[in-house]
Image: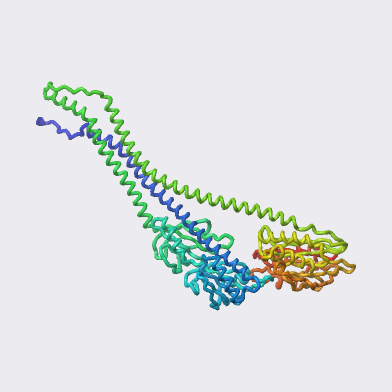
Amino acid sequence: MADQPGQKRSRPRLGMRGYLFLVIAVVASVPVAILGFVQARHWADVDLATTDRVALALERLLGNQIALEIAGHAKSAEVLAAQLGAPGNLGPDKLRKVMQNHIASHPEQSGAMVVAPDGVAIGNVFASGEWTQTHFNYADRPYFQRASATKRTVVSPRVVLGKLTRVPNIHVASPALDEAGNLLAVAISPVDLGLTSARARAVAAGLPDGRVVVVDSEGHLIGDSADDEPRLRDVSMHPLFAFVRGAYDLRFGTDEIGRPMRATVVPVDLGGLGDLGWRVVAMRPLSSIERHRIRVRNETLVVVALALLAALVISAGVAAWLARPVRALADVALAVERGDYSRLPESTRGGPAEVAHLTSVVGSMIRSLRGQAEILEGLVADRTVDLRTANQNLEGALQDLQRKERRIQEDIAQARLFQESILPVLPASPGLDIHAAYLPIEQVGGDIYDVCALGAGNFRFFVADAIGHGVQASMRTIVLKAEYDRLKAAHGDPGAVLEALNARLIGLFPGNEVLCTACCFDIELRPDGGRVVYANAAHVPVLHFRAGGVEAIHMDGPMLGASRNAWREMLRVDVRPGETLVATTDGLLEQTNSAREMFETAVLPTLDLSRAVSATDAVATILAALHGFRGACALGDDLLLLAIRVV
């Protein structure tokens, strides 16, 4: 019909199907879009945090592998040093046999060296068993100097190229000592670091686009998952590889070639061998992380887009289906407007079912969206379960170690109580004032003493120092004290006591398992003081403090438990009233300070006990002088003081 003049032309309007499509599409699509965009960012953050936790676990695994390898080499070096300390083992033929047997028993080692006290190598054995005398000079090596000076096992924190193998390595040095504690040689075991890169590469396989490196104390790369052969590149100027303080560190910075990185850093913990300053760095390029985040986000957005497309298609179909009865009514109305009454509206059976159908469609759309979300959340849940299982395994292993550590500490505490229980009650005498002090460097130690009365005015004193420290040494002292108690009153002089005790130890332990130094002396009280009868078994001197200063009561003697010997000669010394005898161990005389001076030479010659009016005062004066001398330096050995003042 043509428009009449003056009649306004109406604008096109949406039909029922268009309105229904807009309403259903908005209701279905907006929640999908909002949830999709929020989840896209959330899943990217969750994935990054999960990767950081995986990197820390892999770094700790690599650090533990390195620490266990170094600890194993340190123990084998100590075993070789102990064998070299036996008499005659440093001769060329005997040395060759000892070193070849040692390398055969430790196939994991790439070789071993034996170096004389002057620093010149006297023997070298390779993993194949080949033995040579290279005569290389190791006197300038810090690990050789430290092992010689401290007489303890030393691990070199610096990575160098081996003189013979030409591969990066560090060295473990352990001193070999004779029965008197003198340095015979130094056993050196190189720790081959050639497999560090392979280990790093195996660990890095669990880190997408990741790189794992091991850095030494001087900032050199000693292991690199991206480099088959370590080249000891210097990265000390890059903060990304700097020392770590604490259990771990999360860093952002550039690597040695300037690439921006996100890194986690953990230290390599060697336990009782000290801190080498090494650390493990696991890093991923920020560009790779960003690409991964974008990929996760885009994958999520693709899923959201597909869900939106499905929602729109379904919305169009539902709108068309719902609008069909209304359009049929509109057609009927147009027919009536044209004056056609022949067309009647069709019966719409189950009219309310249309609402049920609409509800079913919307519910179907929501269920479709929920299914997509459950699929994505299921992937995250599986990843979380894997990580939780790995953490539980690590926690279980840590708890086992902690239980074993507690059990060991409880056993050590019981051993300390038992060791204290076997120490004697000092006898009271009007002619002697006796006091003792015992300071082990661990909970239990290897020093022991005994004082007993043999009769009126006659006393016997015994001081011993078992080889070693800690629990092993304490077990030796228990055996030693038990055997001494059986013999101490059965012989007339100290030499006979030492001879009988030595024979007993060799009979019980023919393999020299109980080696110790000792001295035994009797004090017979007289009106003018006392007479000392002294016998020695490779022990440090007894200190005689008198008005003129301090003198050493000492004579040579063989070590107990090593070989059968006789103690025929004894030393006799007179002690006046007011004078003090101090029987001690090498823990006092060989204690050093920060300047590497020894107490025996730096303090003892001028030590004055003239103001000490009792044995207790004498012990306190000596300990005060010792602590003032050593300052911040720790005690180097177990310390025993047995002071006897003649009244």
Quarter of the view holding residue 206: bottom left
Quarter of the view holding residue 426: bottom right
Color encoding of the figure = rainbow
Q: Residue furthest bottom?
A: 135
Q: Is residue 131 left or right of residue 536?
A: left
Q: x, y percentage for residue 60? A: 49, 56
Q: Nearer the viewer, residue 479 or 400?
A: 479
Q: x, y percentage for residue 420? A: 73, 56
Q: Is residue 33 left or right of residue 507?
A: left
Q: Is residue 187 left or right of residue 558?
A: left
Determine if residue 494 is in view. Answer: yes
Q: x, y percentage for residue 92? A: 59, 76
Determine if residue 236 is in view. Answer: no
Quadrant for the C terminus in the image: bottom right
Quarter of the view holding residue 256: bottom left
Q: Nearer the viewer, residue 242 or 446?
A: 446
Q: Is residue 320 left or right of residue 580?
A: left
In the image, is residue 385 above or below residue 481?
above
In the image, is residue 572 above or below residue 290?
below
Q: Residue furthest right?
A: 527
Q: Nearer the viewer, residue 230 or 338?
A: 230
Residue, x 71% and y 62% (percent of image)?
A: 508
